[in-house]
């Protein structure tokens, strides 16, 4: 059975991406949660991940670390899950928006850390955050307009693109970010996913805290 090593569900945005992608495959898996604020946590994780970071995935003798690499591995292993859009144009755009999320939006990450349990309307509006928010809203509208006709998600059916933007959805809820009707409908579709409801429920039951995220 596949094992996925993740961080606190309340805080770990990268873990959510890999976990949600794995849930979309429908395959059973085991999860192990690390408290990212625990002493010597890097050393504890390094026994499972060479970088000392999560998420990390074990599948027999295969080891995969980094959320994007995990997503690509799952897309290859479970092609029937449709983690990437079938249409080549949609797939190219999906890869682009995933890569943009993977490497960008640093101001939003810094000033609006993921915190599922918290409600902080209007907070986190540091330098550069509004530009990041507008870029995300624009990207969501573009994907929905060009490729979203087959369903409620960025490329119609739920895909890796939605896995990668799911933590942003939780941030927009936590910090009460204003959304137009198209983006609001997309946010609600992501929140309604059974796997997202499961993750958020688990996050709300966690008791561990991390001052770095509890701004």
Image (cartoon, rainbow, N blue to C red):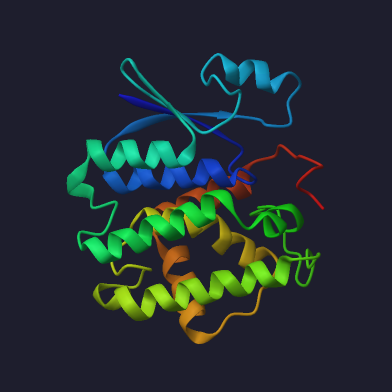
Q: Is residue 37 above or below residue 106?
A: above
**Quarter of the figure that contains the N terminus:** top left
Name the residue: 36% across, 60% down: 94
Q: Is residue 142 above or below residue 23?
A: below
The residue lying toward the viewer, choosing from 172 and 88, is 88
- 77 with respect to 212 (left or right): left
Name the residue: 68% across, 54% down: 106
The quarter holding residue 104 reads: bottom right
**Residue 207 x/y as whole percent:** 70, 39
Q: Is residue 72 above or below residue 113?
A: above
Name the residue: 58% across, 71% down: 135
The quarter holding residue 170 reads: bottom right
**Residue 152 x/y as whole percent:** 34, 73
The residue lying toward the viewer, choosing from 214 and 68, is 68
The residue lying toward the viewer, choosing from 203 and 6, is 6
**Residue 144 x/y as whole percent:** 38, 76
- 45 with respect to 150 (left or right): right
Count every numbered label the image shows and give the total. 0
């Amino acid at each position: 059975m596949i094992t996925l090593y993740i961080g606190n569900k309340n805080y770990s945005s990268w873990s959510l991406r890999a976990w949600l992608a794995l849930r979309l495959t429908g395959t059973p898996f085991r999860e192990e949660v690390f408290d990212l604020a625990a002493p010597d946590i890097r050393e504890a994780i390094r026994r499972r991940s060479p970088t000392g970071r999560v998420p990390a995935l074990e599948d027999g003798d295969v080891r995969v670390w980094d959320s994007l690499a995990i997503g690509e591995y799952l897309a290859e292993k479970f092609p029937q899950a449709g983690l990437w859009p079938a249409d080549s144009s949609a797939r190219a755009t999906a890869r682009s928006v995933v890569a943009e999320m993977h490497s960008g939006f640093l101001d939003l990450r810094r000033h609006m850390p993921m915190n599922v349990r918290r409600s902080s309307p209007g907070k986190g509006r540091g330098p550069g955050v509004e530009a990041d928010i507008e870029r995300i809203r624009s990207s969501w509208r573009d994907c929905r307009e060009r490729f979203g006709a087959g369903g409620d998600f960025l490329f119609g059916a739920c895909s890796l693109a939605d896995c990668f933007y799911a933590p942003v959805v939780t941030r927009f809820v936590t910090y009460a970010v204003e959304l137009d009707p198209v983006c609001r409908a997309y946010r609600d579709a992501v929140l309604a996913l059974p796997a997202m409801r499961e993750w958020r429920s688990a996050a709300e039951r966690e008791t561990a805290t991390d001052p770095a995220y509890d701004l």
